[in-house]
Amino acid sequence: MDEAARQQDGTTTRPGGGARGGETAQTLDRGLRLLHLVADAPGGLTITEAANLLGIGRAAVYRLVGALNGHGMVRRDGDGRLRLGAGVLHLARRAQPLLAEGALPALRRLAEEAGATAHLTMVEGGEGVALAVVEPSWTSFHVAYRTGTRHPLERGAAGRAILAGRSGSAGPVGTSGELQPGAYGVAAPVLGVPGLEASVGVVALAPLDSQVVGEQVLAAATAIATALSS
């Protein structure tokens, strides 16, 4: 490869022929950026589109795709467009217990303060999934809410809070009877954690004080975002 080709490709070498130490880091950075670009493109990306977005040559994109494809992170569909591979789901499942563990202290505090079942809900496959649930210890009765429970984002406080977070709203969202007759929910989005769309909230069998519980939920959302970002 001549010097002009190296410049177009974005690579450099030492005078003795050895690769610069920074080149490996640059390649890793480009691979991760490509992964994010593919994740943010519901219709997939062409090689040319990816090259333009990354500001590198098509040959460099092919090499990145080859490496990511080998790890199952990226695949090419029948039209040759780049899409996320099944390996991303594997990593996401591995990360879920860590997310739940990081959120538990704030969820326990929220459940005790609100006297209601607290939960952390994240987006998976276009739905809301209860990743962690904590029930209050002192109430006579409370909602039994199972981890792994799925629901549309358009129904229930948890999903609606996630949708509100997408539009930049951090305030609490309240609903009544949308997922279960007679159940009341208040939730707020967990913002500021790269790669995570989630909400934290409570659900109860009696009406909730939207102002008091809303502040408690917002505090929990902030605490969870801090815990997961540190």
Image (cartoon, grey):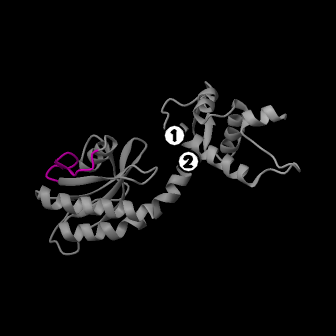
Look at label 2 and name its amino acid: Val
**Left or right relative to 7: residue 42:** left
| Label 2–label 1 contact, CB within 8 A | yes
Taking the magenta stretch, the answer to whether it contains residue 220 is: no
* Residue at the image point whose x is 23% and y is 47% from the top: 179
Q: Quadrant of residue 130?
A: bottom left
Query: Please, what secondary structure does the residue beneath circle 1 have?
Result: helix
Residue under the image location 67 percent in, 52 percent down: 25
Residue 97 sits above or below residue 183 on the image: below
| Residue nearest the observer in this picture, 191 or 117 | 191
The circle drawn on residue 39 is 1
Tell me the residue at 89%/50% (across/down). 16
Q: Nearer the viewer, residue 7 or 156?
A: 7
Q: Which residue is mark 2?
A: 88
Magenta region? 169-183
Q: Is residue 39 left or right of residue 144?
A: right
